[in-house]
Image (tube, coloured by chain):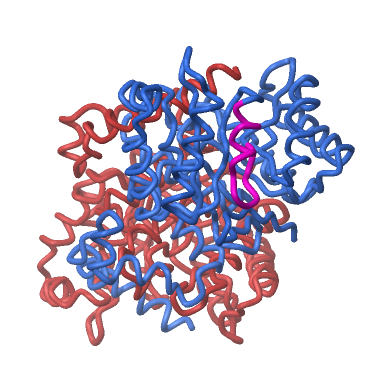
Chain colours: A red, B blue
Amino acid sequence: MTDTVISSATREVVLGLERPFVMIGERINPTGRKILAAEMAAGNFSRVESDALAQIAAGAHMLDVNAGIPLADEPAILARAVQLVQSITDVPLSIDSSIVKALEAGLAVYRGKPLVNSVTGEEERLETVLPLVKKYGAAVVAISNDETGISEDPDVRFAVAKKIVQRAADHGIPACDVVVDPLVMPIGAINQAGRQVMHLLGRLKNELKVNTTCGASNVSFGLPAREGISATFLSMAIGAGLTSAIMNPMHLEIVKACMAADVMMGHDPDCARWIKRFREAPPLQAAGGAAPPPEGAGRGRREGGHRRRVQSQA
Amino acid sequence: MTDTVISSATREVVLGLERPFVMIGERINPTGRKILAAEMAAGNFSRVESDALAQIAAGAHMLDVNAGIPLADEPAILARAVQLVQSITDVPLSIDSSIVKALEAGLAVYRGKPLVNSVTGEEERLETVLPLVKKYGAAVVAISNDETGISEDPDVRFAVAKKIVQRAADHGIPACDVVVDPLVMPIGAINQAGRQVMHLLGRLKNELKVNTTCGASNVSFGLPAREGISATFLSMAIGAGLTSAIMNPMHLEIVKACMAADVMMGHDPDCARWIKRFREAPPLQAAGGAAPPPEGAGRGRREGGHRRRVQSQA
């Protein structure tokens, strides 16, 4: 199967259908975070630093870094944020901007092979972003929309993704370095958004054979108990072939879903990572708390019936 | 698509790929519950009554009723339990026993069209249980194992399920009244159990076109933070085509996963059921507690970035 390698100066992360799911922390993003935006614009990166360390402690394998601040010098701020995060962590980064000069500034200072977030199917974006991705030997997130916007027809989105993969090849970028974002819309607004994404993930896995990522928080926008919607979306999407997501690792319910999905897909041998994180208290405290052991234990007792039923059949 | 109708005297529940997921409460089962077993054997059904009401309040659409107590008169106890539960609730029941005489005793007193749990692919079971299912006009759970036991090869299990559906037809039972249990093994013991079930669910949906159920608690047997594993298993399995499960509705994390899966599959129009349960506090208290609103609210703020990103793309 296709493997996509992303790296820092000292660590590699591999996206793939036969690999554990890759959690990309979304928190270093000033959009909608006024305090963080003001601090970054003023050259204060202390919150960027604490957000980076907290997301990694919570389980993030990579971090997305965005410096989209209106009227600020985004290229300089993004480059500085990338350098700072790389100076205090060794996880690979996703360099996130809609401004090509900012992407280039981030790429210029990055040590390793980053994920460029992102290119769309729009001609102007393809012809400005792909050469940069090739120049720096990076991988790129391909968002399946184009000049016509985001189609609600997953097969139209598939065609856009296929076009981006082909265009990347024209620029000398292999398909394994294109990570497709099927685009997850808020399901509170578009009730079929989940079905659309699952169908598209299936085609991307079986036909285009590329790795995938998405902004997982979008799906639950506007709904109460968001974590429950996001956790189930991720579980279902991983089952359908999603291999990474830009998400909020600070919510244990969501990290649990991704770790449980690794167990379910057979990507956590002997459930070792699951057991280590959820049975041993000390590491858990550091990583953001565990599910209450009494509940698990109580449930174990109460479900002897089904356990025994299975054992008698086995 | 195939619809399976199960009913009480006054209420119908329909299993189907284009229907909301059906949660079947597993708690009325003395196996592994010593106090309940002793009470039922002594003719005290107060806990059966409270378990029935509590599971329905927590969201169960149907209840499984099992009276498997060693050395007790299971047919009489099962019949009494079925009558009692039907006297205090209107949800359809799954009559659960490995003893044919007990199934018949339960069927004889049941009002409506029950789900018989279960028949296997074993010749002796097929020829004793299927005539009963036909006689009482019930639906039946078909467990995909036979004299050779439970195969770890999902395609062998598929063949067993297909044989049961064909044999049911020989007895005049339509395929829509056969609900296949793909058999969910503890993933802590069989790491590929999840992949096996997802593959089998796909074949059952696309080739045999039958409805499905399973003992969902089995998958997390022996693991810490069981609810997380069961919730993700159910989310992924519903995405793969599972249409019902015998499960523990007393754990909000698991009920949330099933309700979120309905949202994700487009089976909760306008997310109305999700919003009603998780936004309105009073009904929630009665139904087992909600996710803490502050968290949801806080998350909404923190994720403005992704919200805005989507809006700008839309």
A250 horizontally vs B139: left or right: left
- Please tell me which residue is depicted at 19% across the width and 47% down the height of the picture: A88
Provide residue A45's location: percent of width, then percent of height. 13, 63
Tell me residue B227's x, y (percent).
36, 40
State left or right for residue B118 relative to residue A117: right
Count of labels shown? 0
Q: Which residues are magenta?
A: B102-116
Q: Nearer the viewer, residue A182 or B236?
A: B236
For the residue pair A73 and A287, the one nearer the viewer reads as A287
Residue A69 seen in the figure = yes
Query: Where the C terminus of chain A falls, by quadrant?
Result: top right
User: If the image is split into quadrants, where does the N terminus of chain A sit?
Assistant: top right
Which residue of the protein is positioned furthest toward the top in this rendering? B71
Is A246 drawn above or below residue B172 in the view shown?
below
The answer to whether residue B122 is left or right of residue B102 is: right
Q: Nearer the viewer, residue B168 or A231?
A: B168
| Residue A256 at x, y percent in the picture | 35, 44
Look at 57% across and 37% down and name the residue there: B95
Is residue B196 something that shows in the picture? Answer: no
Q: Give the residue drawn at x 80%, y 39%.
A: B165
Residue A290 or residue A7, whichever sits in front: A290
**Snapshot quadrant of residue B105:** top right
Instruction: Establish if A55 lies above or below A192.
Output: above
Q: Is residue B228 above or below residue B218?
A: below
Q: Position of residue B118 (x, y in %)?
A: 65, 32
Q: Quadrant of residue B200?
A: top right
> Would you say A83 lies left or right of A221 here?
left
Residue A265 colored in magenta in the image: no
